[in-house]
């Protein structure tokens, strides 16, 4: 599976974490071909959950999307992976 990570000032440790965690998702759904991960940060000081993560997973016949926000980019990535895992298992059980 190809993992494309986008965002400004994304450290390499976060890139490898995204590849590792989305690689686990590939075990559940074999038809995953590509995943696009977008990291962004809100600059408004009133927003507590500043770091946002959006992931689009390309499957054979559909796209699976999830977004989350947290205080740290790693936490946002964990929330998104949990949401994607839930969506994939729901589709798998249908």
Image (cartoon, rainbow, N blue to C red):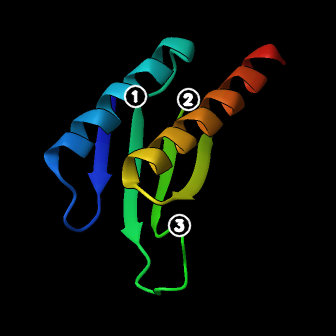
Percent coordinates x, y for residue 20 in the rendering: 32, 26
Q: Is residue 46 depicted above or below 69 in this figure?
A: below
Q: How many marks?
A: 3
Asked which quadrant contains residue 88, the reply is top right
Image depth: mark 1 or mark 3 in front: 3
Q: Is residue 18 depicted above or below 90 in this figure?
A: below
Q: Is residue 75 left or right of residue 11?
A: right
Residues 37 and 53: in front is 53
Residue displayed at 49% across by 23% down: 25
Q: Is residue 72 depicted above or below 32 in this figure?
A: below
Image depth: mark 2 or mark 1 in front: 1
SS assignment at label 1: helix
Locate the C terminus and report the quarter of the image it occupies.
Answer: top right
Residue displayed at 73% across by 17% down: 92
Which residue position is annotated with label 2?
A: 60
Q: Which mark is residue 49?
A: 3
Q: Which mark is residue 21?
A: 1
Q: Is residue 24 left or right of residue 17?
A: right
Asked which quadrant contains residue 61, the reply is top right
Q: Earlier in the sequence, mark 2 or mark 1?
A: 1
Q: Earlier in the sequence, mark 1 or mark 3?
A: 1
Locate the N terminus and report the quarter of the image it occupies.
Answer: top left
Residues 72 and 40: in front is 72
Percent coordinates x, y for residue 57 in the rendering: 50, 40
Q: Is residue 37 depicted above or below 25 in this figure?
A: below
Q: Earlier in the sequence, mark 2 or mark 3?
A: 3
Callout 2: few (<14), some (14-19), or many (20+) C-alpha neighbours within 10 Å? few
Q: CA distance from mark 1 to mark 3?
A: 21 Å
Q: Give the farthest residue toward the left.
A: 12
Residues 33 and 85: in front is 85
């Amino acid at each position: 599976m190809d993992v494309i990570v986008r965002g400004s000032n994304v450290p390499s440790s976060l890139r490898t974490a995204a590849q590792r965690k989305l690689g686990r998702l590939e075990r559940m759904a074999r038809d995953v071909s590509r995943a696009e991960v977008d990291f962004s940060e809100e600059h408004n000081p009133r927003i507590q959950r500043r770091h946002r993560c959006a992931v689009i997973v390309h499957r054979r016949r559909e796209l699976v999307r999830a977004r989350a926000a947290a205080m740290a980019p790693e936490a946002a990535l964990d929330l998104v992976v949990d949401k994607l895992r839930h969506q994939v298992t729901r589709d798998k059980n249908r």
